Image: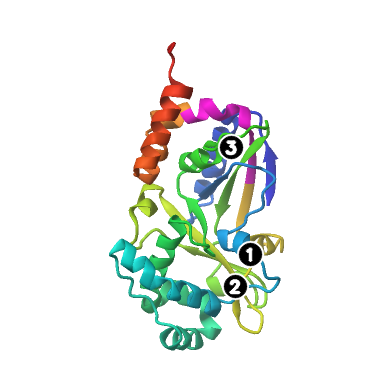
Amino acid sequence: MQEINLNSWEEFEEQIKRLENNRLQQESASKFLYRGQDDHTWSLLTTLEKNWQEEEGLSLKRYHHLIFVVKPQIESFTGVNWNILSYPDQFEKWLNENDTLMPDAFGCSIDFQDTYSYMVYLRHYGFPSPFLDWSSSPYIAAYFAFRQVLRRKDNVSIYVFLESASPIGLKSGCSDKPYIYRFGPYVRTDRRHFLQQSQYTICIMHNGEWQYAPHEDAFALCDTDQDLLWKFNIPYSERLKVLRLLDGYNINALSLFGSEESLMETMSLREINLRDREL
């Protein structure tokens, strides 16, 4: 990972243009993903890592059991039915059939698509998830970086991720190393996924069984065949300038969440922080 400290929002835009020009010159088919975090000292952690307190990693099998047992309550409250792999029968069968080809299985297995849809829904509504969420838009990532009101003066971070062009089976070398897999945008799920131009990554490894692993363990390998990551630190003092710019592009809480709570957040930002008039 390359970490770069910037002095302004304009410097970030220049960096993005430079990276994009380099990508086009190399004729790379992969496209950048962006993730904003409102504290530059934070690691790249999934919400599952933040909530999982046990020292041992969480296996794919155990996590699927967790999301399977909560499904009836979620369906009762939302009125939406999710046709995911049943536990244990269907999921264990799928896991066994794909044990030696697990990274390929996520993208190639039709059986997993409904489960992916359900996992995306859970991620957007706060259930601990192994998905690290990204956006295909640097401006949406910037909104999430600058959204929160912080009392201290510090930096926010925007991560830029570029997937390796190497074939899936060559990226991690062997299954006992952490491996990052990217989930694309094409899935039938909650509208927030589309409003936020979302894509996701997971990090997995085989340690006796397939389990989720920290993303930073994979990036720390410094493998030339692995994916590329940049971290841009931008002063928090740029916040209102950036949020004003983004609101002009209609990137705000309302456009990204579409709820009554996000309406109130957007109206308060406009009237209290961004309005150029006396009260």
The magenta-colored residue range is 231-243
Counting residues from the N terminus, which is met first, the one under dot 2 or under dot 1?
2
Asked whether the beta carbons under mark 3 and mark 2 sit within 8 Å of each other, the answer is: no
Can residue 99 be found in the magenta stretch?
no
Q: Earlier in the sequence, mark 1 or mark 3?
A: 3
Query: Residue at the top extreme?
Result: 278
Q: Which residue is mark 1?
A: 225
Three-letter amino acid code at the position of disc 2: Leu
Asked if the residues shown at circle 2 and circle 1 are in contact, with their CB atoms under 8 angstroms apart, the answer is: yes
Say if mark 1 contacts mark 3, CB within 8 Å. no
In the rendered view, would you say 268 is above or below 105?
above
Taking depth in this image into account, of 85 and 99 the one nearest to the observer is: 85
Q: Which residue is mark 3?
A: 15
Query: How far separated are the C-alphas under marks 1 and 3?
Result: 23 Å
Q: CA distance from mark 3 to mark 2?
A: 29 Å
Q: Secondary structure at mark 1?
A: loop
Quadrant into which the C terminus falls: top left
> Label 1 amino acid?
Asp
Q: Is residue 265 left or right of residue 231?
A: left
SS at badge 3 = helix
Identify residue for label 2.
170
Q: Position of residue 74 (x, y in %)?
A: 37, 66
Q: Nearer the viewer, residue 17 or 234?
A: 234
Amino acid on which disc 3 is placed: Gln
* Spot occupied by residue 15 in the image (x, y as percentages of width and height): 59, 37
Mark 3 Cα within 10 Å, few/some/many (few <14, many 20+)?
some
Label count reads: 3
**x, y percentage for residue 44?**
63, 54
